[in-house]
Amino acid sequence: MIDQIVVDARDLTRVFGTSPPRTAIEGVDLRVHSAEFVAVFGPSGSGKSTLLSIVGGLDTGYRGTATLLGRDLAAMSDRELSRLRGAHVGFVFQAFHLLDHLSVLDNVLVPSLFHPRSASMDDAREALRKVGLHDRMSDPTTALSGGQRQRVAIARAIAHRPALLICDEPTGNLDADTAAQIIDIFTSLNRDDGATVLCATHDTRIAEAASRTIELRDGRVVAAEVSP
Ligand SMILES: Nc1ncnc2c1ncn2[C@@H]1O[C@H](COP(=O)(O)OP(=O)(O)O)[C@@H](O)[C@H]1O
Ligand SMILES: [Mg+2]
């Protein structure tokens, strides 16, 4: 795989509101290369979600520069950002966000309704195989456990083979054993498939699984470490 800079963010600052203004992140740099697994680690309120929203093209109200796959996000319209996300980014959130009246397979295919050239039926099946749910494809998601529901959300996020998989507290709603299974999936997606993973967490086990960790405290980077 060609080494590529997937995310390049420099001196990012995000201030919310005016009376009083609240600085969510300040002066943050983040660079993510292809095939890296980077954890953004820090306590609640430290700015992790704010940082991920900016580099994932979901929030444009920042100062500083942010590029995704070489494209300057501040220079793009909402429509262009939506297309870029649909084609090249997959998102996994703490709360799964599944559509419970649909089957497992249909949930994985939902993004392709909005981005027609994204995941095919075969891609969706392959993604479900990777997360170990190929035998549950026609079940309603209501029949699944929390960990299985998060695996559906991961399959949905990877089916179109995104250049960047962004995860925001993906184990936050799961018990320890289930969380460990989810972490194993991210590890194998990264190690075996070369997926580029950017994961916000306060779970130390995700930080240990990652190839690199940046630590935020009160909106600033306080440490950056490479795993031994
Ligand atoms: N949309 C928003 N409006 C106002 N304040 C916000 C908003 N989003 C985040 N913040 C504030 O920014 C800070 C960082 O939040 P966040 O990025 O969600 O942290 P984390 O994900 O690490 O818990 C917090 O003080 C939070 O209250
Ligand atoms: Mg958060």
Image (cartoon, rainbow, N blue to C red):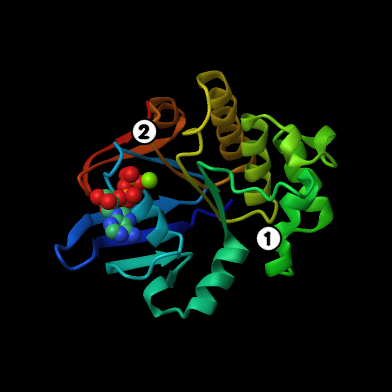
In-front residue for pair 132/138: 138
Tell me the crowding category of disc 2: few under 14, some 14 to 19, or many 20 or more residues within 10 angstroms, Cα based. Answer: some
Q: Position of residue 167 (x, y in %)?
A: 49, 45
In the rendered structure, the answer to whether residue 145 lies left or right of residue 207 reads right
At label 2, which amino acid type do we have? Answer: His
Residue at point 50% right, 72% down? Answer: 81
For residue 210, which quarter of the picture?
Answer: top left
Q: Mark 2 points at which residue?
A: 202
Image vertical order of residue 6 relative to residue 138, above or below: below
In the rendered structure, the answer to whether residue 115 lies left or right of residue 220 reads right
At label 1, which amino acid type do we have? Answer: Pro
Disc tally is: 2
Q: Name the residue under label 1.
A: 111
Residue at point 54% right, 30% down? Answer: 183
In-front residue for pair 196/107: 107
For residue 50, which quarter of the picture?
Answer: bottom left
Q: What element carries label 2?
A: loop
Q: In which quarter of the image is the C terminus?
A: top left
